[in-house]
Amino acid sequence: MHASAFHTVLHAVVAGTILIGMAACKDATPPPDTLYRFTVTGTGANVVPLPAPGADRTCAAAVTLTANDDSTITYSYTVTAAPNGTVDSVAIYAAATGATLPATASVVLCATEAGCTGSGTTAKIATGYPGLRTLMRGYATQLVIFTTTRQIAVGGAIRGVIYPTP
């Protein structure tokens, strides 16, 4: 084969390979963004101030969160040991472990007994969303589940640190 014919064939093979590769990748779904996925194992024993011994201290919940790129948070929670009262709100607070909760939540995930069904997605968070995601990645936030009998004045019913999912 002549050198120029060889180069012509080589260019055609390379170009064809590139086009096939581009077509194969055109509709590929990108890998999931694990940078903003979180878990919480909350208990009544984490509440500040600490509740009296009994059901208020031994209640527990498992929570998963995804801080989405569209400034919303998708969540799912399962109460694994029931607290006193009925779950009526779930919120995220910028607070350290052992600290008293600030007066206002950073984000309310759900509110009202009817609205707290175990999973959902928040409305778009208008302000402070990038900072909240950074705090969540830095272990500087707490998820708190409130019930009809354990509101903010008593620290909620179930509380836990938000941990990034590996």
Image: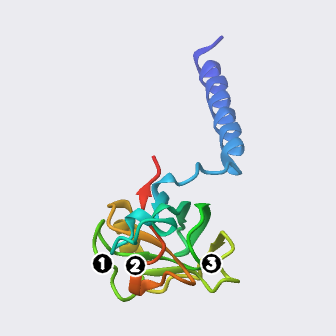
Amino acid type, mark 3: Thr
Residue 101 is at least partly visible in this image: yes
Q: Position of residue 157 (x, y in %)?
A: 48, 73
Q: Circles 2 and 1: CB distance less than 8 Å?
A: yes
| 10 lies left or right of 131 | right
Q: Earlier in the sequence, mark 2 or mark 3?
A: 3
Q: Position of residue 3 (x, y in %)?
A: 58, 16
Q: Position of residue 166 (x, y in %)?
A: 45, 46
The residue shown at (30%, 78%) is 100
Q: Name the residue beneath numbered marker 1.
A: 100
Question: What distance separates the C-alpha of mark 1 from that of mark 3?
Answer: 22 Å
Of residues 22 and 54, the one drawn nearer to the viewer in this rendering: 54
Amino acid type, mark 1: Thr
Q: Name the residue beneath numbered marker 2.
A: 155
Amino acid type, mark 2: Gly
Q: Position of residue 164 (x, y in %)?
A: 43, 55
Rendering quarter of residue 132:
bottom left
Of residues 17 and 146, the one drawn nearer to the viewer in this rendering: 146
Dot 1: element: loop
Q: Name the residue beneath numbered marker 3.
A: 86
| 134 lies left or right of 157 | left
The residue shown at (42%, 66%) is 53
The residue shown at (67%, 27%) is 13
Quarter of the picture holding the N terminus: top right
